[in-house]
Amino acid sequence: MNIHEYQGQEILKRYGVRVSEGIVADNPDRAVAAAKRLKQLTGTDIWVVKAQIHAGGRGKGGGVKVATSLDEVKEVSKQILGMQLVTHQTGPEGKKVNKVLVAQNVFYAGESEPKEYYMSVLLNRDTSRNIIMYSTEGGMDIEKVAEETPHLIYKEEIDPATGVLPFQARRVAFNLGLSGKAFKEMTKFVTALYKAYEGADASLVEINPVLKTSDDLVMAIDAKINLDDNALYRHRDFIEMRDLDEEDPAEIEASKHNLNFVKLDGNVGCMVNGAGLAMATMDIIKLSGGDPANFLDVGGGANAQTVEAGLKIILADPNVKAILINIFGGIVRCDRVAHGVVEAYKKIGDIDIPIIVRLQGTNAEGGKKIIDESGLKVFSAITLKEASDLVQELVG
């Protein structure tokens, strides 16, 4: 589950991570009130107004602006709130901004120059261990840094049995070129950040930038946190952080029926039981000359209700020209799935695109017979090649 920057900072603070203070607002007047409150709390008289959407690259898209007066806070809030913010992560359609974060200015004058770093914590699937990835090149697109100057990307692999050890935190600070107070601050920051990652059951914590201030404090200026959906039962308060306005309506509907759904840009919808089979099905569609319109895993409990819900979600996409249902009958019998397809088809009605049903496994022949004798515009297949040929014939 994705959350907003201000929500991520709330989580980080719980684990002792120093963050820049900010207050969220949903209209210009509340943004001004937030700026006044921040001035009382921190003494700042310069504010940063930041669009709150589930995407990076907000600054380049015009979603982050500096204000040097309360009037300017109100003006830039008016500009950002309600805008359709387009970044390299939103796609050309962009995302509507409903909230802004009014944050304190932390680039103040002091004994040394402020310095920005990049840091993230995530899982290394090759080693089944978490890693801390960091760089001296903070505040930039990390993908560009990795492509052009890969030697500036450092990785610290963490043993899950021990967590971050003191020497590892020190090594991070050393590689970032820090010394003295800033060195000690960074070791504390690294340790607290990893605790936040583990404690919140996150799948990603990314801070860009991590800032060393002019008085050698280390703090998170940004906070991108992805939470593991499967662990939300341990964090009931996190569930309330879900912002449905930031999610695709089809994915919201799918979650109501416990369907794993991701919308794509293709022309062939697919419904499969099992994530691995779903990936293979998407490959089949691509090799047959089509493009997958979605990833949809109905799991092991495919029945008339889940098939109906899945079909409705896929059919809501006007780009879909055909649907491939690819089911392996293991936990669920193929004849049961076939009955579900027929019932769902009749219940939905007025389906004007072809549906290909490939059944393999328990009672596959019986399921094929049910499809063939239904009299509906449903094509049955047993092998992957048959399904592929039908996709090519009907779409390509």
Image: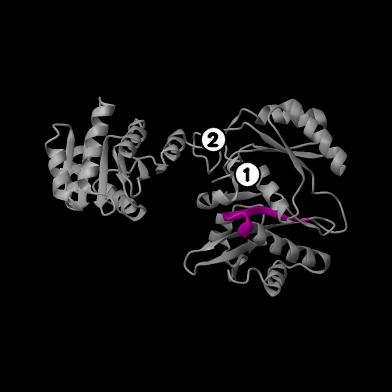
State the residue at coordinates (62%, 31%).
98
Which numbered disc flags the more N-terminal residue, 1 or 2? Answer: 1
Relative depth, front residue between 309 and 184: 309
Whether residue 183 appears in this view of the structure is yes
Where does the C terminus fall, quadrant-wise? top left
Q: Is residue 173 above or below residue 352?
A: below
State the residue at coordinates (37%, 34%).
313
Q: How many marks?
A: 2
* Residue 206 shown in magenta: yes
Q: Give the residues drawn in magenta, as a range.
A: 197-212
Whether residue 396 appears in this view of the structure is no
Q: Secondary structure at mark 2?
A: helix
For marks 1 and 2, give the CA distance.
Answer: 16 Å
Q: Where residue 374 sits in the image (x, y, percent)?
A: 14, 34
In the rendering, which numbered label is found on residue 237?
A: 1
Q: Secondary structure at mark 1?
A: helix
Question: Foreground mark, 1 or 2?
Answer: 1
Q: Where residue 187 sits in the image (x, y, percent)?
A: 74, 66
* Residue 41 shown in magenta: no
- Coloured how? one colour
Q: Which residue is mark 2?
A: 244
Viewed as shown, does residue 149 lie left or right of 287? right
State the residue at coordinates (48%, 64%).
125
The kind of residue tagged 1 is Asp
Viewed as shown, does residue 230 lie left or right of 219? left
Q: Where residue 143 sits in the image (x, y, percent)?
A: 55, 55
The kind of residue tagged 2 is Leu
